[in-house]
Amino acid sequence: MKPIIALTKGRLEKQFIKFLQSLNYEVEPIINKGRKLRVETDTFQFIFAKGPDVTTYVEHGIADLGIVGGDIIAEFQPDVFNLFPLPFGHCRMAVATEDGKVWPNQKKKIASKYTGITKEYFRNKGESVDIIKLEGSVELAPILGLADGIVDIVETGTTLKENGLVVQEEFFSFSARCIANRSSLKIKRDVLTPIIESFQKQEEYV
Ligand code: PRP
């Protein structure tokens, strides 16, 4: 049986394909998958899901390995083996506000997809804030007056810039991570070990 890897759709998927290519794994079936959510290469079976769901599939042992952002691990703290960082998907978690705006005197309203991380960040500062949960396009919230600021990931900084927001503080850096189901690591050790070792040969990745 080929090992099953749950892969985060979107940006991480594209970066992971390049990473696989650099390690000489077959990638053509992934590139040409169309709208299919399951694909098999000569070495792996892949399933494609959103980040939080990748952790769910790995946690439940449906997938042996998962490729997911460090932000998702920090936010959801899934019960998986958090194996190692991968050499792509480098981002920072940041607090941002509208350019030129100062924080209000009253309790701040912070919009974020990451309510857990946001709560923790402001708790560490000894500050109580109102957190407004959004599912995406978080940068809209301060512009439209829904929130005073946001907590979100910054990769290139383009989204912030193009929406007139500036970083107040970057408080944690992360990359993509390889996670594993705890039982798979034991039961499928012979199959998974060479794969994990190949993924860890990061110095060969350009
Ligand atoms: C993420 C994040 C920012 C953007 C940052 O959103 O929430 O909006 O990427 O990237 P940048 O610094 O390179 O501009 P994503 O693209 O995942 O979409 P979303 O807004 O639907 O969450």
Image: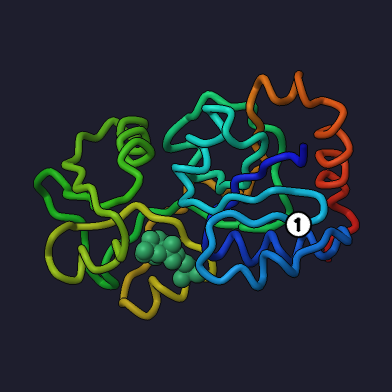
Instruction: Please name the residue that numbered disc 1 is placed on.
Output: 41
| Quadrant of the rendering where the C terminus is positioned | bottom right
Farthest-out residue, bottom: 162
Q: Nearer the viewer, residue 145 or 179?
A: 179
| Residue count near mark 1 (Cα–Cα under 10 Å), binned few <14, some 14–19, many ≥20 | some
Q: Secondary structure at mark 1?
A: loop
| In the displayed structure image, the side of residue 40 where residue 9 appears, left or right | left
Amino acid at dot 1: Thr
Answer above or below: position of 70 versus 101: above
Residue 190 drawn at (x, y percent): 87, 28
Q: Nearer the viewer, residue 63 or 202?
A: 63
Farthest-out residue, front: 1
* Residue 63 visible in the snapshot: yes
Residue 153 drawn at (x, y percent): 45, 56
What residue is at 37 percent from the left and 58 percent from the top?
168
What residue is at 82 percent from the left and 55 percent from the top?
42
Residue 79 drawn at (x, y percent): 53, 24
Q: Is mark 1 within 8 Å of ligand 1?
A: no
Residue 142 drawn at (x, y percent): 20, 64
Quadrant in the picture for residue 127: top left
| In the displayed structure image, the side of residue 183 where residue 138 appears, left or right | left
What residue is at 30 percent from the left and 35 percent from the top?
119
| In the displayed structure image, the side of residue 38 where residue 40 appears, left or right | right
| Quadrant of the rendering where the N terminus is positioned | top right
* Residue 167 visible in the snapshot: no
Instruction: Determine the quadrant in which ligand 1 lies.
Output: bottom left
Q: Nearer the viewer, residue 157 or 101?
A: 157
Q: Nearer the viewer, residue 97 or 16?
A: 16
Answer above or below: position of 60 versus 196: above
- Numbered-mark total: 1
| In the displayed structure image, the side of residue 205 where residue 73 appears, left or right | left
Answer above or below: position of 181 versus 200: above
